[in-house]
Amino acid sequence: MQLVGVLNAGSSSLKFSLYEPRDGTLAVVLQGQIGGIGTAPHFTARDGDGARVVDEGLAHVRSTGDALAHLFDWTAGQVGEAQFLAIGHRVVHGGPDFAAPVRIDDTVLAALDDLVPLAPLHQPHNLAPIRAIAARRPDVPQVACFDTAFHRGHPEVADRFAVPDELYRAGVRRYGFHGLSYEYVSGRLAELAPEAAAGRVVVAHLGSGASMCAIKAGHSIDSTMGFTALDSLPMGTRSGAIDPGVLLYLLTERGMDAKALEDFLYRDCGLKGLSGISNDMRDLEASEDPAAKRAIDYFVARIGRELGALSASLGGLDALVFTAGIGERSPSLRARVCRDAAWLGVALDDAANAAGGPRITTDGAAVSAWVIPTDEERMIARHTLRVLGFATAVEAA
């Protein structure tokens, strides 16, 4: 058996997928994650049929390195003598130079290290497994797939801040994120509704991290996220867009230093900060506390505002797509966003929305709306095989 592996490492979790290329498709062999790293680590995994094959605590796992070692040992017991063609990694930030997936070598890894200040909560965790695998299995090729790469074709005006040109040339620009998700969803929309996908589309990636992207004929032309993954919509614990004057106030009047400000913006804001209850939309939707309602109202209002702005960037709108955890699983939030977007031509089909789509607007709606589950891991597997020249093993996008 020949396999391609995918790793998506975060600060407290290690997600993985194993695929077997079969006749031009990618068949899932195993998928799962080790979550709660550093607190209460727990390992879950399912096979290609969706049956749970492991569900257990891992008291000995205290770091991403421990989690990776456990995953390697466990995987070897599951797939035996399987050959790994390659391992692909989600890397959040590719900076101005990495506009496409790339095979990893020492030079690439050093360049990605230099980008850690642009994604301090993501990049170090993305890179740690790369080093661990290189030490343990140097024979296995590794490929970095970037969340920023899908947005690299933006018009320059969409990537600029109103700062001196020297800063732009130094890399201070709008990058956009969630690109692997947007790329996958754009391809799925082309399968479901080719005419809509060929036109003007806004995709709303709504999860613990949240952003929106304007896509014209399959290409990103604008995004709500900017220099870092802090910008854009309010998120689970991240602030989203905020007046820079607020940051100056926190530094000068509230006595915060740079580290305290970073922790505050990444961990104490967003839905958690607005509600004072939870960063989880499910908790907020289940709560009767007025603060929970306030947080949801704010989230919906910001989505509507960004939808209008991105529609302006596109010169109109043909389709709206919801994806990621909240976008895929919250019919009530989708309904509110669609009703607020009636002025754009969105006409919600309540029954279709309650059923989860894929199309959730009426047949006669001027703008169609869709629910399309994202699959960043599959997108990474496709890119990994293509980069390494396994053309016959790659399924169509």
Image (cartoon, rainbow, N blue to C red):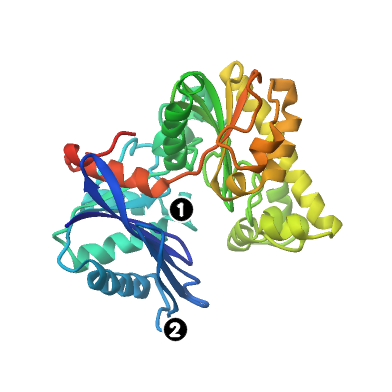
**Residue 123, image x, y percentages:** 42, 55
Dot placed on the residue nearer the N-terminal end, 1 or 2: 2
Image position of 373 (left or right of 136): right
Residue at image location 53% in from the left, 26% down from the top: 158
**Residue 381, image x, y percentages:** 30, 47
Residue at image location 72% in from the left, 48% down from the top: 246
Residue 116, located in which quarter of the rendered image?
A: bottom left
Q: What residue does disc 1 label?
A: 117
Residue 152, located in which quarter of the rendered image?
A: top left
In the depicted structure, whether residue 291 falls above or below residue 137: above
In the depicted structure, whether residue 146 falls above or below residue 162: below
In the depicted structure, whether residue 318 falls above or below residue 25: above
The type of residue carrying mark 1 is Pro
Q: Secondary structure at mark 1?
A: helix
* Closer to the camera in the image, 124 or 283: 283
In the depicted structure, whether residue 26 falls above or below residue 219: below
Q: What residue does disc 2 label?
A: 59
Q: Is the residue marked by circle 1 packed among few (<14), some (14-19), or many (20+) residues within 10 Å? A: few
Outermost residue, right side: 290
The type of residue carrying mark 2 is Ala
* Closer to the camera in the image, 233 or 42: 42
Image position of 48 (left or right of 335): left
**Disc 1 from disc 2: Cα separation:** 31 Å
Image position of 207 (left or right of 165): right
Q: Is residue 277 visible?
A: yes
Residue 153: give its label: none
User: Mark 1–mark 2 contact, CB under 8 Å?
Assistant: no
Q: Is the residue marked by circle 2 packed among few (<14), some (14-19), or many (20+) residues within 10 Å? A: few
Name the quadrant of the C terminus. top left
Q: How many marks?
A: 2
Q: Nearer the viewer, mark 1 or mark 2?
A: 2
Q: Secondary structure at mark 2?
A: loop
